[in-house]
Image (cartoon, coloured by chain):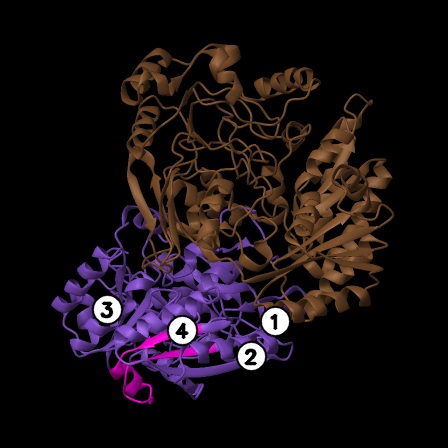
Amino acid sequence: MTPTATDLEHVRHALSSDLERSPQHYVLGGVTPAIAFAPTDPSEIAALVHAADEVGLAVAPLGARTATAVGRPLSRYDVALDLRALDRVIEYVPEDLVVTVQAGVTLTTLQTTLREHGQYLPTDPPPGDEVTVGGLLASARSGAWRGHLPAARDLILGMAVALPSGEVVHSGGRVVKNVTGFDMHRMHTGALGALGVIVEATFKLTPLPAVTRTLLLPAGDIDACGALARRVWDAGLVVRAITVLGARAAAEAMLPPAAAVLVEVAGSEASAERTLREIRALAPAAGDAPAEAWGRLRRLAAGPGATVLRIGVPPAEVETTVAALERSGLAAWAHLAAGSVMARGDVAASEIEALRALAAERGGFLQVEIASATLRQAVDPTGATERTLVEALKQQFDPRGTLNPGRWGAGL
Amino acid sequence: MPPPTGPNLSARHASDATLALTMATSSAAASPASAGHPAGHEALVRDLQAALGPASVLHLFEDIIAFEYDATIERALPEVVVFPGTTADVSAAVRIAEQYLRPVVPRGSGSGLSGGAVPLTGGVLVVLTKMNRILEIDVANRVAVVQPGVINLQLQEALAPKGLLFAPDPSSQRVCSIGGNVANNSGGPHTLAHGSTVNHVLGLEVVLPGGRVARLGGRLADTPGIDLRGLFVGSEGTLGVVTEVTVRLVRTAPAVRTLVAVFDSVEAASEAVSAIIRRGIIPVALEMLDREIIRLVEPRIHAGYPLDAGAVLLVEVEGLAEGVDADGASVEEACRGAGAREIRVARTAGERDRLWEARRVGIGAIGAAAPAFYLLDGVVPRSKLPEVMHGVMETSARYGFRVANIFHAGDGNLHPNLMFDPDDEGATARVLACAEEIMRLCVDAGGAVTGEHGIGLEKRSYLEWIYSPADLAAMNAVRVAFGGAERFNPCKMLPGGHGCASGHGAEALNAMRRGSDSV
């Protein structure tokens, strides 16, 4: 249904004309929106979303556009809302280990700012630090550090969100410990923008480790790698990542094409030194590996051109899962502590359903992280079962289905 | 019948209770104790007895009187108290309550510090103490599944031999339940390094309107879908009843170092907190005890805290032995730089326990030393600690109250305890005014009105200091999505509400406690 000229005028009327952009720059899944804006202020965003809501136009909030192939394809797309002009670090108090930023700030910019004070936001989402804070939170994806360090949903202290009602609402605050009111910021984290447009967020930060080292631990077959990875995990060492690589995954990450364990040591000098010693004792064949391997794994987890699955299984079962996936022709690797198995390649809808059933038997889940629109129509990307509450929340926060319609399935 | 739990009742408590009961009764219009039972009472009791068994349903005044309060002294009588043994029991109780248009109020150990378990408008109190089994400890995958009535310490004791722990460790851990920890998103001394309860809950089984049983989250982190688990944790029983909790476990650190740094003033100790963090060290615990607390506690425990100290920091770092050495040395330097006149390192596990004993018995010692005290919970950015602590001391002195501070300094989470005698003319009103000024100091410094005790009844009206009407409307929308404010724990967390007493003076007055030993 093409928006009428009157509808578009109504939306244009909400914002200054110099904030309008060419819709051609915001094509998603082959669809060009009718109109596009790049507001610079949260209140402008609220005004825009409200105006669109009044005339029934669908709005897609966009940042670096690294997660547009996550979730179901949009069912309607009229207004592109480019958040990248919301690019200010609002407040950074290094002594408090707390930062408040606008949603369009990229992780690169944020980490650069924080690094000057020896701090960072400990999260490593796919595909890399080009993601915006808004995208990081809305998609809630994480990487190899998950399980060793808290993820974005654990680091979020407060949030401001623009709603279709035209209001900008806040939850949480700027202190590291806070139980004042409902934690709506947790609800928005991972909601794919379905319940509001994240415009500002406050995070708890972590001191940068003094030393980081990447080690590759060859251990024979994938079973031996899994066992070794768990021994490293159980040793109580200062590590930030323990990733079990299938042979295909290792090759795609430009490492020797054999099953192995990739470990990142991160800590103070004294702790890191002890950790390196212990790891060499556990795995005499351990050797240094390029730190870039982590960046390559992050890119591999983001597509493009391939389907990416995230399969959650108990840590004790990661290697059997990796082995099964690699046997079926996929590249697979597993972040041990989170029980997060990533798989990449060509995979049919029927295979996904079979894998999902297998994961469920083990108390886990399967999420289609990245896939073609066709595949994301054929298979429910999340397999999330609790629909009643999600529908009720959508009804409360976005009753007319203005925000990212369809990304959680029909009617959501 | 399970034993009632609640604060230690001192001799003088009984007369106070009468006063408080009168107030609660006058504020809750339809209190069943005074006005007789609402229509359908007999049928409600009969249906609950049929569903849960007669032994699991209490409805006589003398049986339910023990369930009218939690660790605050706000009081309101439930209409019926039930003790479900299974999720199906909880589901049935919720369904039946709904059928008779009664609210459901979940309750664990009753150790809450904000009035969260007080059934302000009566209804069915669902006490989860019988659902107290640890269902599973999966050592390899570092996961435990527990029923909501499991006591925090009971879980810790089951985990310790396996080298694992559940990180949230509220000071009330000997009595508080995991379900209560979930409801309040509880913290504790070790929150500084490990985060609050929400960071350790993987999945929940909950009972929702209509008795529907839902599973939120799962056995692993980052379960797909909208994070209803994260929304539910900390919702203080206003969205439903938790019937099972799946938690993430943390490995016990191989090495730990506990030290005490002695300062001449609270301000100097506060400076040291920032100095430690500035060095890039996050201790696993960083607690402050002021002069008043030390003088109350040291004669009881003989841990060697100097009686002339202005304040001490109790600092714990953990990790690999080598790292602990380095971090411990760095903490010492930071403390000396901020003016520490003495630093004492625990050499043995026994010494460590004795140092921590001060933290554990602190609140009890205050209870024994004053006829009454009011325990506050506020949070400020840690860099604002020196000025806010100065303000706390100045404000209490101006009102003429002794104040004892024992708190989570590393998190900026203050716990001033205002000591007073309620028999002094006007003392209670002055305590309220003083507490409110201190809360204002926290908010003005960019902080929050509760770090771990919750909003409950006590702090509903303070929310308006922090959130706009639109913010609160959005929070209420969450509640509506979960079935509305009348179903589960009415009158809690959000200001106002249909049939809820308002007026913060009455709430805060009722939140005073007399010698409860939990923080």
Report if the CB atoms under discs 4 and 2 are less than 8 Å apart: no
The amino acid type of the residue labelled 2 equals Glu
Q: For residue B360, what is the image quadrant?
A: top right
The amino acid type of the residue labelled 4 equals Ile
Q: Is residue B468 magenta?
A: no
Front-most of residues A133 and B49: B49
* Residue B261 falls left or right of residue A173: right
Which of labels 2 and 3 is toward the front?
A: 2
* Residue A355 falls left or right of residue B369: left
Report if the CB atoms under discs 1 and 2 are less than 8 Å apart: yes
- Residues under labels 1 and 3: Cα distance? 35 Å
Front-most of residues A344 and B96: A344
Q: Which chain is purple?
A: A
The amino acid type of the residue labelled 1 equals Glu
Q: Which residue is mark 1?
A: B322
- Residues under labels 2 and 3: Cα distance? 32 Å
Front-most of residues A90 and A95: A95
The disc at residue A242 is 4
Q: Which residue is mark 3?
A: A320
Q: Quadrant of the C terminus of chain B?
A: top right
Residue under the image location 72 percent in, 45 percent down: B406
The disc at residue A273 is 2
Q: Which residues are magenta?
A: A241-264
In this picture, is B430 found above or below A246? Answer: above
Res A57 visible: no
The amino acid type of the residue labelled 3 equals Thr
